[in-house]
Amino acid sequence: MRRHLVAAAVVTAAALSLAACGTTESASSGDTASPASKKITVTDATGTKVTLDGPATKVVGTEWSVLENLVQLGVDPVGASDVKGYNSYDTAEPLKSGTKDIGTRGEPSMDTIASLSPDLIVATTDLSASALKQLRKVAPVITVKSADAADQIGQMTKNLDMIAKATGTTAKATAIEKQLDTKIAEGKQKIADAGLTGSKIAFADAYVVSNQVTVRAYTSGSMLGAVNEELGLKNAWTLKGDGAYGLASTDVEGLTKLGDVQFAYEVNDADGDPFTDQLAKNSVWKSLPFVKDDKVHRLHDGIWMFGGPAAAESYIDAIVDTLTK
């Protein structure tokens, strides 16, 4: 199964570049961060109130989405889960060279994290309760909700805001969110100008187990599904997605129900491409209308489908350019 799958399931090329490597802003920046001597209290996704002595500066992130948020906010994590994987799958906001790898996203190394003496650990609700309990013995932990199929974009910005409050970078968060709104509006206009508003699109990825290809459908409840609809596109998937990530699974025969659509997908060279490898000679795949009409689009590597605003912007650039070229 592909490395980026989270649990059993789990938007850029022009990510907002915001200068400053620190976690607090000067008075001229307009940030509302408190002075370092003033305590900050954050209520996280678990309902836990976490009090910090001031804006966190030595931060560890256990999930790629929060790592992306931290880097975009100008906070270089001192520790990150699966650094190599992150730099392959989420290229919108690369980690600083030398960032300490703390282990896998599901099983971070407590000893490694403790050795970094962080003043904050940012985790998600995908991490087990036992792991979170252990982390809290090392340093203060804020936990963000990993995803919400009912409102992915809203959840994305809520997570960014929470991390920004804890790191004293609220002005940057506001600027990032405005930039995303602008990117969506610009992309929607380009789609409209190309006469593509209302066009059906099916976004997917795939993985191979025992030589069998499973196609993962990104329904309207997925992050990229939500972005597509913001751009004026119509989600072609009729499958019901899960409550967190809005994902569903099918096989190649299930693709026959899509009809004539634009089919876009994301894979990574690190894992191979099931659509061009395993399915290239598959008779069902070759018979699909969007395959025969050359409406299959592989987007570039490094767009993290479960990321924050930077990943969303990267996806918008890629999908709009692909559909309107």
Image: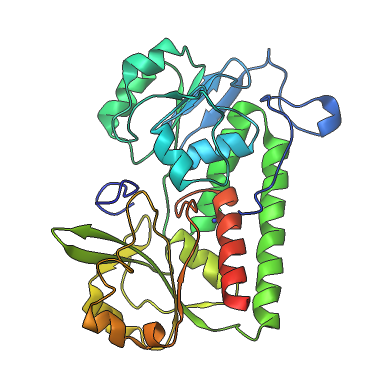
Res. 47 in view:
no
Within the image, what quadrant is residue 220 found in? bottom left
Picture coordinates of residue 23 (x, y %)?
Answer: 66, 25
Residue at left offset 61%, top offset 70%? 320
Residue at left offset 58%, top offset 56%? 314
Left or right: 142 as drawn, with respect to 182: left
Picture coordinates of residue 49 (x, y %)?
Answer: 48, 27
Left or right: 137 as drawn, with respect to 71: left
Q: Nearer the viewer, residue 95 or 128?
A: 95
| Residue 203 to residue 152: above or below | below
Q: Nearer the viewer, residue 24 or 200?
A: 200
| Residue 301 to residue 163: above or below | below
Farthest residue in the right direction?
A: 28
Within the image, what quadrant is residue 240 found in? bottom left
Image quadrant holding the C terminus, namely bottom right
Left or right: 233 as drawn, with respect to 285: right
Res. 104 in view:
yes
